Amino acid sequence: MKTNHILLIFCILIVTGCSHDDEPFVEKEGRIIILMYHRIVKGEASFLYERSLADFEDDLQYLQKNN
């Protein structure tokens, strides 16, 4: 019985984790966007969780122009 519960929970986690929306959800004005960066580097980003300083500045400019 315990094995069945573990298998059921595992299947639910797999199914919910694999779904995604095609279009991002856009909130009304007045919301706060929180961005999380693991590491910002001066040169080129060489790791999945790194962002170059130039790309980070582009991100900020994009957010400023697009509210």
Image (cartoon, rainbow, N blue to C red):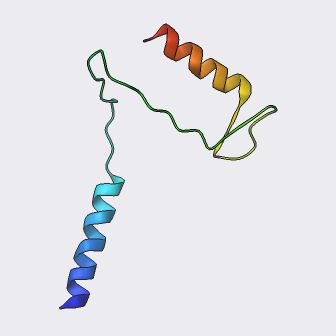
Q: Residue at x 29, y 60 (%)?
A: 15
Identity of the residue furthest to the top in this view: 65
In percent of width and height, residue 42 lies at 80, 31
Q: Residue at x 58, y 19 (%)?
A: 60
**What quarter of the picture does the N terminus occupy?**
bottom left
Q: Quadrant of residue 59?
A: top right
Q: Left or right? Give the position of 13 relative to 1.
A: right
Residue 5, image x, y percentages:
21, 81
Q: Nearer the viewer, residue 12 or 38?
A: 38
Identify the residue at the far right of this view. Answer: 43
Image height of 40 relative to 19, above or below: above
Marker count (numbered): 0
Residue at the limit of the structure toward the left, as seen here = 1
Which x, y percent locates residue 8? Answer: 22, 75
Q: Quadrant of the C terminus?
A: top left
Quadrant of the rendered structure where residue 32 is? top left
Q: Is residue 44 above or below residue 1?
A: above
Report whether 55 appears left or right of 22: right
Image quadrant of residue 50? top right
In the image as oriented, which residue stretches furthest toward the bottom?
Answer: 1
Q: Residue at x 67, y 25 (%)?
A: 55
Quick check: 40 above or below 3? above
